[in-house]
Image (cartoon, grey):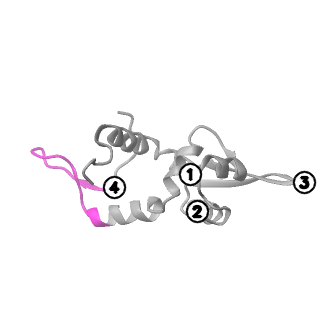
Amino acid sequence: MRSNLQRPAVETDRRSQPRFVDPSAAFETIQTITGRKWHLRIVYHLLDEPKGFSDLKSALDGVSGKMLSESLSTLDREGLVNRTVVSDQPVRVEYALTERGAALEPALDDLIDWTETYGPREDA
């Protein structure tokens, strides 16, 4: 398992696993950053290389231009994505993960592994 992520402040007890001091605050942060439908998908598609808006739109089946634009703006505000104007005629913008955004890779890998192991419940 590759994990470079630093966890929020934890209490450790030699007899138990580390636990978050305030798990509700940790979960609130996680939900704020990743809780939208497209956010994790956008981060996933930017893991390998920066992409332009139209490349992302093509990779994300079903996302509207407006929703993609709003999601990218939110991810930019949250410090997960950088927006760079590459050329001005015609205007071309590229999106790339920041160090903070790239640090989500191990968590995304773990979530993907979890879904491959446990997948959607057949009885659900």
> Residue under circle 2?
71
Closest to the camera, between mark 4 and mark 2, is 2
Amino acid carrying label 1: it is Ile
The reply to whether the C-beta atoms of the residues labelled 2 and 3 are less than 8 Å apart is no
Q: Residues within 10 Å of mark 4 (few under 14, many from 20)?
A: few
Q: Is residue 66 left or right of residue 87?
A: left
The reply to whether the C-beta atoms of the residues labelled 4 and 1 are less than 8 Å apart is no
Residue 15 place in picture, x, y as percent? 9, 45
Between residue 82 and residue 90, name the one nearer to us. 90
Amino acid carrying label 3: it is Gln
> Residue under circle 3?
89
> Residue under circle 4?
8
Between residue 109 and residue 55, name the one nearer to us. 55
Rounded to the nearest whole Å, what is the CA distance between mark 4 and mark 1? 24 Å
Amino acid carrying label 2: it is Ser
Q: Residues within 10 Å of mark 3 (few under 14, many from 20)?
A: few
Question: Considering only vertical position in the picture, is 77 above or below 89?
Answer: below
> Circle 4 sits in a helix, a strand or a loop, which is it?
loop
**Residue at the top extreme, as displayed:** 1
Give the magenta part as a residue range.
Answer: 8-24
Q: Is residue 82 left or right of residue 35?
A: right
| Main secondary structure type of the part rendered in magenta | loop
Tell me the quadrant of the picture where the C terminus can be found. Answer: bottom left
The reply to whether the C-beta atoms of the residues labelled 1 and 2 are less than 8 Å apart is yes
Q: Residue at point 68% right, 45% down?
A: 51
Confirm whether the magenta stretch covers residue 67.
Answer: no
- Residue 42: assigned label: 1
> Circle 2 sits in a helix, a strand or a loop, which is it?
helix
Q: Residues within 10 Å of mark 2 (few under 14, many from 20)?
A: some
Residue 66 place in picture, x, y as percent? 66, 66
Residue 30 place in picture, x, y as percent? 40, 60
